[in-house]
Structures are given as C-alpha cells and as structure tokens.
C-alpha cells in the first residue's frame, strides 16, 4: 500500500462530503459561511476523519456508516485551530501557508466561524443516525466519545493547562496532560468512534485506543520538533513559535535526542497495539504510524 496515495484518496472523499454540508450561497449570514469555508478548505491533512473512516472500514468492510462522524470530527478540529490562532491564544499570522482566519475576517468573525463549525459538527454527526439504522446505541456512543475528547476532559482541558504554563512550571505531569488531552485525545477518539459505529468488540476498541493514544502523542512530539527544525515553506507557518510563546513542549523539557527516542518508542507501541488484527486489516494503520512519526509537515 502506498500510504500517501491512500491518504490523498480519502482526503478527496472527505473534501467532497464537506462541500455538501457547509453552505456556500447568498445567505444573509454568508460572511460566516465564507469564514468557515476559508479554514475548512485551507488544505488540512484530514488525519482525524481519515482515521475514523479507515477504522470503520477495517472492522466492517465499509466506511460509510462513519461518514457523518468523520465530518463532524474535522469541523471540531478546524474550529479549534481557528481559536488557537487568535491573538488571545497563540497569536499566529499563518496557518497552512495562508493568513489565519482572524487576519482575513477579523477576530469577531473568526470567533463566530469557530463557533459555527463546532455547532455544525454536532448537527452533522446527529444526522448520521440515518446511516446507522441497525444500531442507534453505537452511534450515540461514538458521538459521546468525540464529545468528551473535544471538551473540558479532553482538548479544551489540555488547552487550558497549556495556556497557563510558563517556564517556571515545566513539570512532566503537566506536559503529559497537555499532550494527551490537547492533541492525542481527539486523534484517539477519531479512530475509536469509527470502530464503534462499525460494531467493534471491546477487545478491538481497547487495542485501537492504545494505538490512537500512541500515534497522538507521537504526532504532538513530532510537531514540537518541527516547530524547532522544520521547513517553514513545507509547514506553511513560522517555526519557533513554541519557544517565542514559552510553551512547555517535550522538546523544551527533554531535549532533541530524548524527543526522537520517545517517538521511536511510541511508534513501536502503536504497531504493537495492532497485533490482534491480521496483516491485511492493519497494514494501513501500521504504515500510517511510520509515516506520522517521521513526517516533515
């Protein structure tokens, strides 16, 4: 399997479906839709919704039942990026090589665009009941998984601790809390939610949770490294913002060598978590783990 080709294939599928659910017309409130579409179609990796679709496909043989869940996850992720970039948060000027939402539309519309995507995410996920007529309970469970991962016991909780950190409070426990919740939580929920709607067993879900947590932590540590040594042209944003904003990162706490070693360890844990699935079923996720561990953007 060519992992890049497979990611591009599913990114195209997701983009097509997102076009159907985010309005693009002459509405009275069309400015908010313009701002929402500006960020949602800014060239994202679509990693989280792809994880949801592929886990569903691995368990049931089809990804369709997870489609609405996957679209909602991408909208939640994009809303968080819009808000992260605001002056009150990370104060970033560029995202994916383009001016950030608030630089184009102003802070007021950017805030509302994030709010709009968050609300539309739940509307969209609830519409997915029609795709999962045989088991409403599993769909509710999947939405609950996503909701918790995005809320105060997940992404928002991690972000809260992150913005309160300064150089004098660099503690291992806080760093792990931030990484686990701010980044890894939604990645883990993405793969688990797709498997839930597909009817995965308890054992399968536990192994997929372990996989999701490992690649989520790996993804964040790699982000920390790229913010230090990455290519701005490839990343589409300035590097060095973590250091400028005095962010607590794995790199700042443990150094480059230990950070690279931790990525190796997490990558092995991710692949080990897939051991209950046969080679054909798990090949995408094994290759994805390697791809994410050593990505350049």
Image (spheres, rainbow, N blue to C red):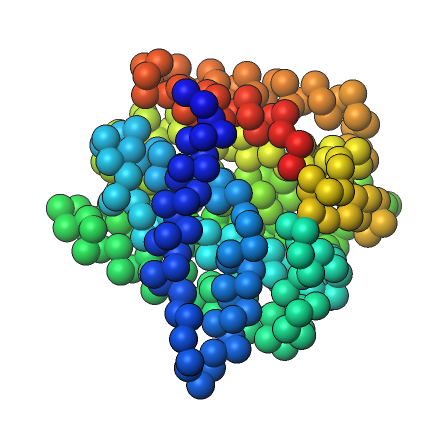
The front one of 131 and 266 is: 131
| Quadrant of the rendered image containing residue 172 | top right
In the image, what residue occupies the spot 73% across and 42% down?
233
In the image, what residue occupies the spot 51% across and 56% down?
41
Q: Is residue 192 visible?
A: no
Pinpoint residue 166: horizontal percent, then vertical percent.
Answer: 82, 50
Pinpoint residue 196: horizontal percent, then vertical percent.
Answer: 29, 39
The front one of 21 and 253 is: 21
In the image, what residue occupies the spot 39% across and 48% down?
14
Q: Quadrant of the C terminus?
A: top right
107 up-or-down from 46: above or below: below
Pinpoint residue 262: horizontal percent, then vertical percent.
Answer: 67, 22
Image check: 157 left or right of 169?
left
Q: Is residue 67 visible?
A: yes
Pinpoint residue 253: horizontal percent, then vertical percent.
Answer: 80, 33
In the image, what residue occupies the spot 33% across and 57% down?
125
Q: Quadrant of the N terminus?
A: top left
Image check: 292 left or right of 60?
right
The front one of 145 and 82 is: 82
251 up-or-down from 110: above or below: above
């Amino acid at each position: 399997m060519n992992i890049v080709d497979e990611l591009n294939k599913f990114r195209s599928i997701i983009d097509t479906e997102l076009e159907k659910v985010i309005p693009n017309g002459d509405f009275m409130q069309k400015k908010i839709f313009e701002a929402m579409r500006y960020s949602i179609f800014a060239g994202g990796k679509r990693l989280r919704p792809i994880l949801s679709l592929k886990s569903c496909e691995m368990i049931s043989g089809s990804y369709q039942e997870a489609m609405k869940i996957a679209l909602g996850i991408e909208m939640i992720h994009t809303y968080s990026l819009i808000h992260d970039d605001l002056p009150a948060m990370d104060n970033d000027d560029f995202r994916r090589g383009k001016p950030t939402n608030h630089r184009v539309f102003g802070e007021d519309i950017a805030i509302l665009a994030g709010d709009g995507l968050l609300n539309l995410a739940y509307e969209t996920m609830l519409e997915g009941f029609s795709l999962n007529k045989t088991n409403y309970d599993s769909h509710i469970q999947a939405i609950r998984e996503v909701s918790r991962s995005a809320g105060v016991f997940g992404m928002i909780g991690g972000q809260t601790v992150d913005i309160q950190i300064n150089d004098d409070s660099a503690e291992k426990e806080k760093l792990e809390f931030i990484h686990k919740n701010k980044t890894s939580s939604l990645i883990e929920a993405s793969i688990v939610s797709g498997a839930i709607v597909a009817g995965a067993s308890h054992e399968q879900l536990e192994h997929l949770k372990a996989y999701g947590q490992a690649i989520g932590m790996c993804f964040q540590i790699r982000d920390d490294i790229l913010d230090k040594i990455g290519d701005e042209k490839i990343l589409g944003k300035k590097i060095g913002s973590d250091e400028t904003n005095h962010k607590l990162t794995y790199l700042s706490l443990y150094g480059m060598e230990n950070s690279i070693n931790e990525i190796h360890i997490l990558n092995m844990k991710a692949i080990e978590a897939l051991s209950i699935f046969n080679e054909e079923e798990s090949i995408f996720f094994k290759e994805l783990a390697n791809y994410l561990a050593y990505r350049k953007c």
